[in-house]
Amino acid sequence: MTTIARAPAEDVVAALTALITEVTGGAIPFGPQGYAVVPAGLVDTASELWLDGARLARGTETVVARDGALCRLRHPAPASGDREREDRERSRWYTGILGIRLGLSEALLDDCVGYLGARESGEAVLLRRQLVQSSIAEVLIEHLEVRAVLAGPEPLDAATRAHLHEQLTGADRELLRLLGASGFTTEGKGRKARVSELLAAAYQPGRVG
């Protein structure tokens, strides 16, 4: 089952930890470009790396940055491994990352609805404005489409995963636009979108981290 963490950005640590335990057995997971975004505590305890499905002993990764409870790492390049096992694990991992991103985006939508419902422009609540309602509806449709694909019985290929990532990124950016300045503060509502973008940069097919 796809991991979907519909929770505040801080709780993405718990969701990532659960996904890492389930798929890689505690190994630090690196995407196809050699980047990882993991809970900071894992950096101190993991004894193995998972590079786009292949497993290696630790020793050549570097810490790029720490962002609160998350840590961003770099490894020179993924290595080849057991292809059958690799493909099965890769599918579970990359689909799970999409589930976490969907959960963050849904939580950001909740924030946006609450924010707009509490603000007025003139004599009207912002949430009741037609253009705002239209934008919210479009984001909700994107969420429902992504959720439906993730719930399907078939493994997702790289092209489908890339499309879902783009849908979620587009939805998040529309929500940030609706949130205005409050969506771009470091520790504000926009942090969910920032964490989601970090995950996309590391694990989206074809992206450079």
Image (cartoon, grey):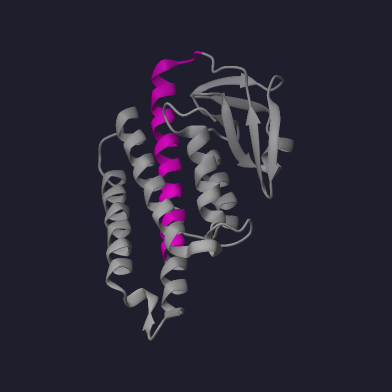
The residue at the far top in this view is 80
Residue stretch rendered in magenta on the structure: 80-109
User: Between 58 and 172, which is closer to the camera in this rendering?
Assistant: 172
Q: Position of residue 87 (x, y in %)?
A: 39, 24
> Does the magenta-highlighted stretch encompass residue 93?
yes
Residue 120 falls left or right of residue 187: left
- What is the x, y in percent for residue 209? 54, 30
- Residue 3 visible? The answer is no
User: In this image, 172 relative to 199: left or right?
Assistant: left
Q: Residue furthest right?
A: 44
Q: Is residue 84 left or right of residue 144?
A: right
- At a point 54% along the width and 41% down the height, the residue shown is 198
Q: Is residue 54 magenta?
A: no
Q: Say if residue 13 shows up in the picture.
A: yes
- Quadrant of the rendered image containing residue 161: top left
Q: How many marks?
A: 0
Q: Of residues 109 and 27, which is closer to you in this image?
A: 109
Q: Position of residue 153 (x, y in %)?
A: 25, 40
The residue at 57%/55% (across/down) is: 191
- The answer to whether 115 is drawn above or below residue 160 in the figure is below
Percent from the top left, x then y, of residue 51? 54, 23
Q: Residue placed at 41% from the left, 43% from the top?
A: 98
Q: Nearer the viewer, residue 181 or 143?
A: 181
* Magenta highlight: main SS: helix
Picture quadrant where residue 155 is located: top left
Q: Most extreme residue toward the bottom, as rendered?
A: 123
